[in-house]
Every structure is written in C-alpha cells, then in structure tokens.
Image (tube, helix red, strand yellow):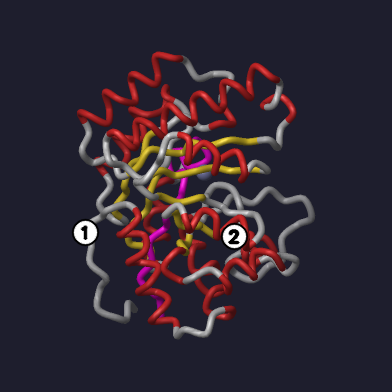
Amino acid sequence: MHWPLLDSHCHLDAPEFDGDREQVMQAASEAGVMGIVVPAYAAPRWPALMALCAHAKQPVLWPALGLHPIYIAEHEEASLQALEAQLISSPELVAVGEIGLDRFLPELITPDMWHKQQRFFEAQLALAQAYNKPVIIHARRCHADIVRSLKRVKFSQGGVVHAFSGSVQEALAYVELGLSLGLGGPLTYPQSRKLREIATQIPLAHLLIETDAPDMVPWPQREQHSDGRPRETGERVRNSPAYLPAVFDAFCQLRPESPEVLARAFWQNTQRVFKLTQPTFPPLQLE
Ligand SMILES: [Zn+2]
C-alpha cells in the first residue's frame, strides 16, 4: 500500500538523473509520489528545468527558479533581471528557489562572497515579494542571518526552509514569519535527535516532506539495496524521489496522528505553501 505523497523538494533536473530520469519518475509514481517541486541551482540550467517540468505528466513536476547560494561565485547580475523576466512570462513557476545563505563552506564566507550571498538572497526575496511567490530557502549555519534578511525585506509570501537543521526555537522563528520547514532523509537517521524534536514539536501545519534527491539518502536506502542486499562500505548512493515514503514512515513513527491524517496534512501543506490547485488529494488508498 502506498500513501499519496508530494515531494516538496527534488532536483530531478540534476545530471545524476540524465541516464534514467524516466525510470526514476516511474519508480516515484509507483511509490505514491504524485507531484514534485523542482527547484533550480543556476541560471544556465533554467531552460532545461522548465522544459523537463513542462513535458512531465506523472508525477506532475512544478518548477521553481532561483540562484542557489552554493554557486554564488558563478551568479551574474544579469541573472537577477532574467529571473524577473521569467517571473513575468512563466505563470507555471510555483516559487523562487532555491535561494538562501550558506556559512558551511569557507569559500562562501570570504567578505566578498558573503556580501554577494546576502545581496543575491535579498534581491530574490524582493522579487518573490513583488510577484507574490513563496520561496524555497537553503539555510546552513545562518538561521539568524536568514531571519534578519526576511525581516529587512518585509517578506510575507511564505515558503519553506528546506532540509531544515536547527533548534526548535530557530524553527519557531520561521513559523512566526509564516514559513514552513521541510524535512527529508536526515530525519530517518538513528542519530537525528534534534530533527525528531522538530518533527514532533512543530505544529503539523508547518511541516513538509521532501527528498532533496539526488542528495540526502534516507537511512533504509543508504543501508541496503531495494532487494535487501547490504551496501558496500563507501558505496555511492543516489537519492531518489521514490524514497520519499521512508521520510513519511519516519513521521508516522514519531507523530501521534494516523498515517491518513499525516498524508493528507503533508499534501495540503505542500499545496498551500506553493499555492497549487491541482491535483486534489486522491481517494485512499493507492495500490
Ligand atoms: Zn536542494
């Protein structure tokens, strides 16, 4: 039995999927994943992302465009104007993303790069605000900076802090600003004590599930192949939107609500955050 699920964050356009994207989408569909939000990294790859989403039928793919902070060195000023042009010409865009700030990598926090990160983040927040789009935020080791930027531009369109990692207090600061939190594979790890607190202490209406594929492989798939054979040590494992049920199962084990209530809530939360009108939650249960 598969619950109908929406993956709120998956980089299905990534080169890792070039060889077998159709099969990955079919596997996701068979696992109950009926829709996927596909956020962008960098402007040169926007056209391919848009084309992929336009042609996909099952699952439904929703595009988001943005300039990811990890690639800050590559981003050009002109890409901000290009983003605005896309927001005007492409009503199918469901969000501005993936955008944000990252303090994890030393090359991203030289004074120049940090300044550029903040400038591009706030410029994209302002565009999302102007065109009534939610945002998909990447935040590593800089929740206070993100909150400051959100307040500085008076951002009010909502969105998601994806792959959230932080304290309950930090999570609640986002909730207060109208944002939701996306949790994925790391929640399934035995050592994820802090994330389990987030999953249980944050109101259900502010939680989304995601895979962030091809990264962030859930624990069961990291440990073994789909046929049960254990992985080799050091074996490189690619995450897939078809593994979203592992994240959903982790929530089912942690939260008091029934799986049906949870499935419905995650579906509706994703629809609300991204202002999606279709598809409606299907009649339970999928075989
Ligand atoms: Zn991502």
Earlier-in-chain disc, 1 versus 2 = 2
24 drawn magenta: no
> Above or below — where is 242 with respect to 216?
below
User: Badge 1 is on which residue?
Assistant: 278
- How many numbered markers are drawn? 2
Name which quarter of the figure residue 49 lies in.
top left
Other-residue count near label 1 (Cα within 10 Å), few / some / many at <14 / 14–19 / ≥20: few
| Residue 267 picture location, percent across and down | 35, 66
- Which quadrant holds the C terminus? bottom left
> Which residue is depicted at the point 40% across and 43% down?
135
Q: CA distance from mark 1 to mark 2?
A: 26 Å
Depicted 174 relative to depicted 47: above or below: below
Residue pointed to by mark 2: 185
Q: Find the magenta span and give its range.
A: 1-18
Query: What's the amino acid at mark 1?
Result: Gln
Residue 41, position in %: x, y?
A: 48, 32
